[in-house]
Amino acid sequence: MELPFKSARVSTLAHATEDEQKVIAALRVLLSNDVEIKGTKLKGHYGNPIVSFGASIGQKRTLHELWQRVVEKLRVGELEKIGGIVDDRTDESCHLYLRFDKQRAYAGELALTDSGDAIHLTLKTAAYPARKEVAAKLVKEFIFKQKTGVGIGSSIGLGDVDETET
């Protein structure tokens, strides 16, 4: 099955008490080294320094790599959780919003979180017509097929792989 996403944005914040290099390392769990991470200096409510780190992805190959990294680094059971929250985390503009625990990501593992200290992944779904329900259905079908192994390879344009051939 074709990758249902046409773009992505990965972002997080580094607060004054955090090592910026460790925050970038946490982002690298999702992003390959060839994806540029940009930093923007901000000031918090009390004047404390904050750096917003982020990267945007629009190339299909890089999107595929991003999704593969997500799937490979997810804790057991997290892909099923994503499938279960797609309806609630997809907006009317067909964006799917996921949040991963930043500390776990630094340790090399991805786990969904609702806390503020998170890596934000926003995936724009290529849904036609561009409606929330269509986008959510595409993503859920894609996750189901990935989970069950149906259509392996089709997400990178290879079509369904026949496991019987060697």
Image (tube, rainbow, N blue to C red):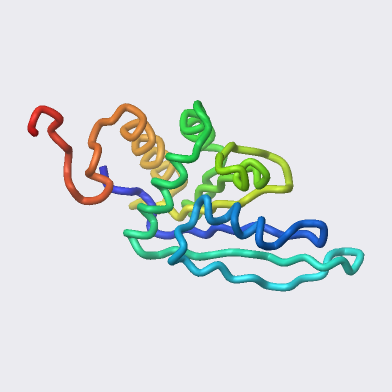
In the current view of this chain or complex, which residue is farthest to the right?
46
Q: Quadrant of residue 124?
A: bottom left
- Of 59 and 128, the residue lying toward us: 59
Please say if 89 is above or below 14: above
Q: Position of residue 159 (x, y in %)?
A: 17, 44
Instruction: Give the residue displayed 16% in from the left and 37% down from the top.
Output: 161
Q: Residue at x 21, y 51 (%)?
A: 157
Q: Quadrant of the C terminus?
A: top left
Figure quadrant of residue 71:
top left
- Rendered image quadrant of residue 160: top left
Residue 127 x %, y %: 36, 51
Residue beneath the point at 32% across and 48% down = 3
Q: Is residue 90 shown above or below 126?
A: above
Q: Quadrant of the N terminus?
A: top left
In the displayed structure, does residue 33 sit left or right of residue 1? right
Out of 3 and 125, give the one closest to the viewer: 3
Q: How many marks?
A: 0
Farthest residue, direction left: 165
Q: Is 57 displayed left or right of 85 in the figure?
A: left
Q: Position of residue 52 (x, y in %)?
A: 68, 65
Is 18 located above or below residue 113 in the figure? below
Q: Residue 20: give x, y in percent of width and height.
A: 70, 62
- In the image, taking residue 15 as reference, residue 83 lies left or right, namely left
Picture residue at 73% right of the left edge, 73% below the top: 41
